[in-house]
Amino acid sequence: MAQGEQSGPRSGKGQVVPDAQRPTKSPTLYARQEIADKTGRVSPHLGVTSFLPVNGKGGEDLAGPYEPVPDWPKTIEAGWRLSGPSGCYAASADKVLVVSHFGMVRDLKTDLKWGRNVFSIDASPFRTYGTLEMKPTNHVVTFDRDGRMVDSWTWQDKLFGKINRVFVDPHDPQGHIWITDSKRQKVFKFSPNGREIVMQIGEVEAGSQPDHPWKAEDIAWLPNGDFYIAGLGRIDRFTKDGKHVWSKQARGSEPGEFFDLHGLALDPVRHRIYLADRGNSRIQVFDEDWNFLDLWPNILAPYAMRLAKNGDVWVADGFTSKFLRYDPDGRLITSWGQWGISPGTAWGIHWFDTDPDGNLYVCEVYAERVQKYRLRKDVSPQDPRIIGELHRY
């Protein structure tokens, strides 16, 4: 036997240490035997930490300048959670109105958050959106700063099919609540407490046509009370009383055309209109008379778009799970965000809003949750990744 050679069993050609004698990989990062599905496959990466720096060291900066607020919101009903939260309106830290696509959905079967097995085990939390049992209740709820539910429009549960957004007209001193529903194809205007339906707009009122169907998606208001509704391949204007007065039908992919619109913002200072042309992976810019001005290409899935008070445009990409900040001419200033389902990551951002205290609220339709973020204490107030105050539609 050559010097240094050891005798003993070998489990493969050239292998010195048999598999059975090898130390296991980190139980934190890799499989743990006590967590397995019915086939015996084990599930790693159950940590719920947001991986922030500790005493200024380490960390991965998953949520940019923010950190997720733990245990927000609180559980509404044991074993259930909001099904596809799709919009929110943060009037204050103590009044955060959240709407969801379908009401409630069965809760996750496992705490799995990270790692390779997250896609393969039977109880994978990525097998969520549209696959678990749903319950049509709590479509419209209000949370306080601690995540406690303080109100739910359960009396309106039968009214909704699939809520897309919730809005408040910034020029309305009474603060009526507007909700768009893309299954019922309705826009509802409610009294502030949700008890009374003040106005309804549907396909008939909007002049929907087989070649140019109308969809209830996004709303933006003019100072005189008139408003636009954007969806699919058309824009429609209504008077404050809900009378349809104008339509731009331009379904396509050429400049000035659009496909699957998913965002609308009016810039009252620069007199511009921004459209999130989700189906064409771009933002388009028009003047106030709807003359085409510019387009910003290669934005994969602009699910939500908000205008900042300083004129910059924030876009949330529903596929890459990034927040993207552009100047008014479309130049990318910064971006942040990490795809995932651990706290501080995101999957399917559908809407976001900020409150007067600077907290950020993120609605995720695929992760089926809404997260509240607060600014990290170690972040400069001048950090360009801070979303800050937003225009109200």
Image (cartoon, helix red, strand yellow):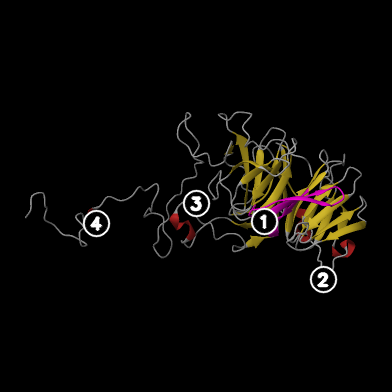
Give the residue furthest to the bottom: 210
Q: Distance between the Cα atoms at labels 4 and 2?
A: 66 Å
Q: Which residue is mark 3?
A: 111
User: Quick one: label 2 or label 3, which is nearer the N terminus?
Assistant: 3
Q: Distance between the Cα atoms at labels 3 and 1?
A: 33 Å
Q: Name the image quarter holding the N terminus.
A: bottom left
Give the residue furthest to the left: 1
Q: Which residue is mark 1?
A: 281
* Residue at the spot 85% in from the left edge and 64% down from the top edge: 203
Looking at the rendered structure, the secondary structure element under dot 3 is: loop
What stretch of residues is rendered in magenta? 274-300
Residue type of the residue flagged with mark 4: Ala
- The answer to if 188 sits in the magenta stretch is no
Q: Which residue is mark 2?
A: 210
**Foreground tag (2 vs 3):** 2
Q: Which residue is mark 4?
A: 20
Residue type of the residue flagged with mark 1: Ser
